[in-house]
């Protein structure tokens, strides 16, 4: 598949009389947007707010981050199975509002949600403090079940991103990039002198608000399968989970997966990027065995020399991660795993819940248990009260003056296991 991605740079967002882009400013007609994303009887109200880099604004609890994208040429549409009909995506041309994001918030759905500060020390830990954010504040009707609450807010986010992206449909991009992966046999044979590399993409799918969707299908119901990396850029994979904010893959992360982008950058130069295997993360041992067996089999069938494996979440999924690593290594294929750590507040505890000697090439996105202190903000979008109960927070995390003391995992994207975060390491 061959996909052209046209990036339209956004440097500011403001409310205006029409939803449009002028001089790198995204103007939003608030009422028109509310009309476009409203109508779900499960939501009592929706409001739209704006949050810009450097403002003293705290957004919490954050449910999803979505980048506005619109399909301008080629089959299908962005977010197939949700706002577009189910059709193959990943080819043609897609336009992107780069620098503008949709955030969803409102009353808490599940305890593993997070926050984004637009300034201060908290802003240093999340890339989403650097974007111009259009925030949909969604409040549910009374006594709405959690899974219905999550679904209703998720759909609002996709509709909001699709609505804003229409402003980019007829614009000339500031940058146009082309990504291409050929059919498997062609791709394998294209660069015979370069090592063949595949990417094993683990999707959170443990249920109970731990869900990811592929073309609208809950990933719990899939078996490991091949997917073109360009399909991911068109929203074929979206978030529906409320796992710990620090390492959840928001929909934005899927659409901008840095592992995929980095492999494309090295494709034809240092390696031959053959393709992507998506697999799920399971609860029961038999399901873990089945998925890891099939993942290793698919990778072997692809004839690759090396594999990068990324995880989503921690604890139980660590077993899926190590199973995938060990079984692929047993096929004679080298692996690198990408994860984060829950090593205790002093960093001295075991980093992963599972381990194996074959997992000898590891990239870490940081220790989510590190304690941080966040100053109060002048404005809160959403609800501040859940800070004491969401993952990373604890009784007394929220101080009387509005400041917060909590673990790093409370911040959205702070230790993201695709590497889309702001932490780095230095050698001393």
Image (cartoon, rainbow, N blue to C red):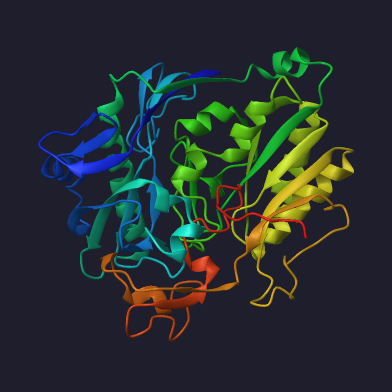
Where is 189 relative to 293, above or below?
Answer: above
Q: Residue at x 82, y 16 (%)?
A: 192
Percent position of residue 396, x then y: 43, 86
Residue 352 in picture, x, y percent from top left: 72, 65
When the figure is inspected, residue 221 is found, relative to residue 184, above or below; the finding is: below
Which corner quadrant holds the C terminus?
bottom right
**Residue 206 lies in what quarter of the image?**
bottom right
Whether residue 20 is situated above or below residue 66 in the rendered picture: above
Q: Is residue 364 left or right of residue 355?
A: left
- Looking at this view, is 7 or 162 the one in front? 7
Taking depth in this image into account, of 26 and 289 the one nearest to the observer is 26
Residue 256 seen from this side: yes
Q: Quadrant of residue 272 in the image?
A: top right
Q: Residue at x 31, y 69 (%)?
A: 377
Where 300 sits versus 124, above or below? above
Quadrant where the N terminus lies? top right
């Amino acid at each position: 598949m061959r996909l052209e991605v046209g990036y339209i740079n956004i440097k500011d967002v403001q409310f205006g009389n029409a939803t449009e882009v002028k001089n790198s400013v995204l103007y939003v007609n608030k009422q028109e947007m509310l009309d476009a994303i409203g109508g779900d009887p499960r939501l009592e109200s929706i409001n739209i707010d704006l949050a810009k880099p450097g403002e003293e604004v705290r957004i919490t609890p954050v449910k999803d981050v979505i980048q506005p994208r619109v399909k301008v040429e080629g089959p299908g549409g962005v977010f197939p199975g949700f706002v577009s009909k189910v059709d193959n995506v990943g080819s043609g041309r897609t336009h992107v509002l780069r620098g503008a994001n949709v955030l969803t918030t409102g009353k808490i759905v599940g305890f593993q949600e997070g926050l984004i500060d637009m300034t201060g020390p908290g802003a240093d830990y999340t890339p989403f403090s650097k974007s111009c954010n259009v925030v949909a504040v969604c409040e549910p009707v009374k006594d709405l079940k959690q899974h219905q609450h999550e679904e209703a807010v998720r759909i609002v986010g996709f509709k909001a991103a699709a609505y804003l992206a229409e402003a980019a449909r007829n614009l000339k991009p500031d940058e146009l990039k082309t990504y291409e992966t050929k059919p498997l046999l062609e791709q394998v044979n294209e660069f015979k002198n370069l090592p063949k590399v595949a990417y094993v993409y683990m999707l959170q799918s443990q249920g109970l608000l731990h869900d990811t969707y592929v073309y609208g299908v809950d990933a719990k119901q899939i078996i490991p399968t091949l997917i073109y990396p360009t399909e991911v850029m068109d929203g074929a994979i979206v978030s529906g989970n409320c796992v710990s904010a620090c390492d959840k893959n928001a929909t934005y992360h899927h659409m901008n997966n840095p592992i995929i982008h980095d492999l494309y950058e090295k494709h034809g130069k240092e390696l031959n990027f053959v393709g992507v295997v998506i697999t799920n993360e399971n609860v029961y041992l038999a399901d873990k065995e089945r998925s890891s067996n099939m993942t290793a089999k698919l990778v072997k069938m692809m004839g690759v020399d090396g594999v990068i494996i990324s995880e989503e979440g921690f604890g139980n999924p660590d077993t899926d991660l190590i199973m995938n690593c060990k079984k692929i290594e047993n096929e004679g294929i080298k692996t690198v795993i990408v994860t984060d750590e829950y090593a205790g507040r002093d960093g001295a505890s075991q980093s992963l819940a599972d381990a194996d000697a074959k997992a000898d090439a590891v990239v870490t996105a940081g220790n989510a248990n590190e304690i941080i202190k966040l100053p109060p903000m002048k404005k809160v979008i959403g609800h501040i009260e859940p800070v004491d109960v969401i993952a990373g927070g604890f009784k007394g995390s929220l101080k009387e003056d509005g400041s917060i003391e909590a673990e790093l995992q409370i911040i959205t994207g702070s230790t993201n296991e695709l590497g889309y975060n702001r932490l780095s390491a230095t050698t001393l």
